[in-house]
Amino acid sequence: MMQALCALMILLGLITLGVAALGLHALVRRRWGRGTTLGLLASAGGVVCGALPVVLASAVASGSADAAQEAQLLAETLATLLNCAAAGLLALPLGGIVALVSLAFGLGSRR
């Protein structure tokens, strides 16, 4: 089960990082609207990559009977899933920067 969750988090992180890279490409090509949209999508994907491991880890650890064992399982699961989601977490600030720069240049070019 943990391998499938890690594979899901890696895939989601790589997709999110790919969207951020496409937003950066749109920024270089001076496609301000597309850059803003892709940057916002990458930022949203980064937030999901940060929040989803917490939800999944708590769901995995909630079936444990002992509180100490549940806490240890929660910590291990969360650490593993956050390591798998690293690419998506990198896309969060990159997407935000791309969105802000695209929005600023897009609004500036209309004047």
Image: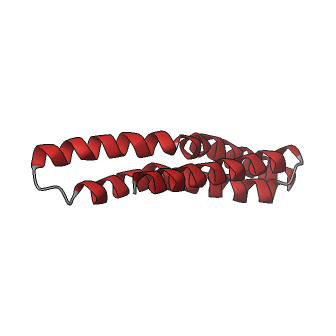
Q: Camera-side residue: 81 or 17?
A: 81
- Residue 32 x/y as whole percent: 81, 54
Q: Is residue 43 visible?
A: no
Residue at the spot 35% in from the left edge and 45% down from the top edge: 78
Number of numbered discs present?
0
The N terminus: image quadrant: bottom left
Q: Camera-side residue: 7 or 55?
A: 7
**In the drawing, does residue 6 fall left or right of residue 28?**
left
Q: Camera-side residue: 67 or 101?
A: 67
Residue at the spot 53% in from the left edge and 40% down from the top edge: 86
**In the drawing, does residue 11 fall left or right of residue 5?**
right
**In the drawing, does residue 107 fall left or right of residue 47?**
right
Residue at the spot 80% in from the left edge and 47% down from the top edge: 105
Residue at the spot 17% in from the left edge and 55% down from the top edge: 64
Q: Is residue 48 visible?
A: yes
Q: Camera-side residue: 103 or 11?
A: 11
- Residue 68 x/y as whole percent: 12, 43
- State the residue lying farthest toward the right: 29
- Residue 6 x/y as whole percent: 48, 50
**In the drawing, does residue 87 fall left or right of residue 99?**
left
Q: How is the image coloured?
A: secondary structure
- Residue 57 x/y as whole percent: 33, 52
